Structure formats: structure tokens, C-alpha cells
Image: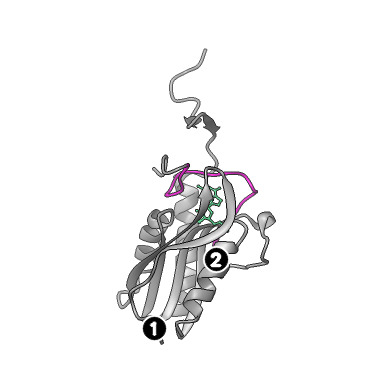
């Protein structure tokens, strides 16, 4: 007999997903990463750059947890995925209007997989002369790296499986 709510698996676009990280684990690691960022940027005026769309939830929780009042938030959008496969080609979909010269920038991303998107962002934003440039990610698929890119802040290092929820999608769905 299958009791209601016993199986928390969900099916999205015909693919079955099982629970991996729960609310409490996420909250605890967000708190840890926030304290690392606070330690590094206390007394500065950080500019948090949230990478849309996947990082919006992580960024909202992380920035509040960091708690530095004299900080600002901006958004950029990149995309390299179709379905569950990387296309290998990184495109910038939406640029940044803010002047980041001289600012202490923290990029906030949902996941680093091959690292191609992260490298492109570090290159693009680094060229705009920030005082410092750091990279925070909720998830890091260390084994999938094609670039050797190492984020400054990582909430979770995970295996190379496809993951959804807490902002991450499957073809636009299931971010919640
Ligand atoms: P990379 O350029 O590092 O290969 O890929 C980074 C982007 O790929 C992420 O911003 C995200 O949009 C997408 N991505 C990589 N792995 C996953 C995953 O497991 N789930 C989801 N939803 N997106 C992923």
C-alpha cells in the first residue's frame, strides 16, 4: 500500500525526480556561505549580481542572510542548457547596465556544471574593472568540470546528476 505523502518523488516532463536536499540542509549551508561572504566583505559595499533565472531563490536567501545593509543587487542572464543537456555554447542573453568599476562584486549562481558559464561571466565582468570579483554558487558539480573553475563559495558539492527546485528548472518548469 502506498501511503499518501510517503513518496515525495515527482514527475516533470516524463522524468522522475527524488528528494535530494531538504529545506533545513539548504538553510544551514546558505547561512554558512553567508557568514563566509560577510567575513570577506564586512565594511565594503558589495554588489551582488544574481544570475537569472535559476539563482533568484538562492540569491534572495543568501543576500538577506549576509545582512550587509550597504550593498546593492543587480541581475544578469546567461543560458547554455536545452533540457538536461548542455549545448556547450554559452550565450549572454541579458547584460548588465550597472557600472561595476571599483565595486566588490559577488556573482550569485545556482549551479556550476562544466564551468563554461562561470568562466564566461568572470571574463565579462572582470573586464569591467571591479575592485574584486567573487563567485558564489549553490551547487557545484565538481566532477563535470571542463574548465577547472573553482568557485569562491559553494553551498553544496554534488554528483553529476540533474537537479531541479529551489530555483533550478527543467525546461522552465519546476523551479518551486
Ligand atoms: P555550465 O556552464 O557550468 O555547464 O552550466 C551552468 C548552467 O547550466 C547553470 O546555470 C544551469 O542553468 C545549467 N545546469 C547545469 N546543471 C544543471 C542541473 O543539474 N539542473 C538544472 N536545472 N540546470 C543545470
Residue 50 occupies quadrant: bottom left
Residue under numbered circle 1: 44
Say left or right for 151 vs 167: right
Q: Position of residue 65 (x, y in %)?
A: 38, 64
Q: Secondary structure at mark 2?
A: helix
Say whether mark 1 is within 8 Å of ligand 1: no
Determine which of the numbered discs, if any, sits on residue 118 in the image: 2
For the view shown, which residue lies furthest in the left direction? 69
Looking at the image, which residue is at 51% across and 69% down? 121
Say left or right for 91 vs 114: left
Say whether mark 2 is within 8 Å of ligand 1: yes
In this view of the protein, can residue 103 be seen by the observer? yes
User: Is residue 26 on the magenta stretch?
Assistant: no
Q: Position of residue 86 (x, y in %)?
A: 58, 51
Q: Position of residue 137 (x, y in %)?
A: 51, 61
In this view of the protein, can residue 153 be seen by the observer? no
Q: Secondary structure at mark 1?
A: loop
User: Is residue 164 on the magenta stretch?
Assistant: yes
Q: Residues within 10 Å of mark 1 (few under 14, many from 20)?
A: few
Determine which of the numbered discs, if any, sits on residue 159 in the image: none
Give the position of the C terminus as an image quadrant. top left
What span is in magenta? 153-170
Residue 21 in the image: above or below residue 141: above
Amino acid at each position: 500500500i502506498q501511503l499518501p505523502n510517503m513518496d515525495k518523488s515527482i514527475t516533470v516532463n516524463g522524468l522522475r525526480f527524488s528528494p535530494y536536499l531538504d529545506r533545513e540542509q539548504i538553510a544551514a549551508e546558505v547561512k554558512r556561505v553567508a557568514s563566509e561572504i560577510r567575513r570577506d566583505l564586512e565594511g565594503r559595499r558589495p554588489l551582488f549580481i544574481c544570475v537569472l533565472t535559476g539563482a533568484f531563490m538562492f540569491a534572495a536567501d543568501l543576500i538577506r542572510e549576509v545582512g550587509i545593509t550597504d550593498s546593492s543587487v543587480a541581475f544578469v542572464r546567461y543560458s547554455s542548457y536545452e533540457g538536461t543537456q548542455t549545448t556547450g555554447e554559452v550565450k549572454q542573453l541579458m547584460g548588465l547596465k550597472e557600472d561595476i568599476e571599483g565595486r566588490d562584486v559577488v556573482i550569485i549562481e545556482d549551479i556550476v556544471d562544466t564551468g563554461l558559464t562561470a568562466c564566461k561571466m568572470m571574463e565579462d565582468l572582470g573586464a569591467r574593472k571591479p575592485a574584486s570579483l567573487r563567485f558564489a554558487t549553490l551547487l557545484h558539480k565538481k566532477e563535470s568540470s571542463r574548465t577547472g573553475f573553482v568557485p569562491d563559495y559553494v553551498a553544496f558539492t554534488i554528483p553529476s546528476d540533474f537537479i531541479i527546485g529551489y530555483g533550478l528548472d527543467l525546461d522552465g518548469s519546476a523551479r518551486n
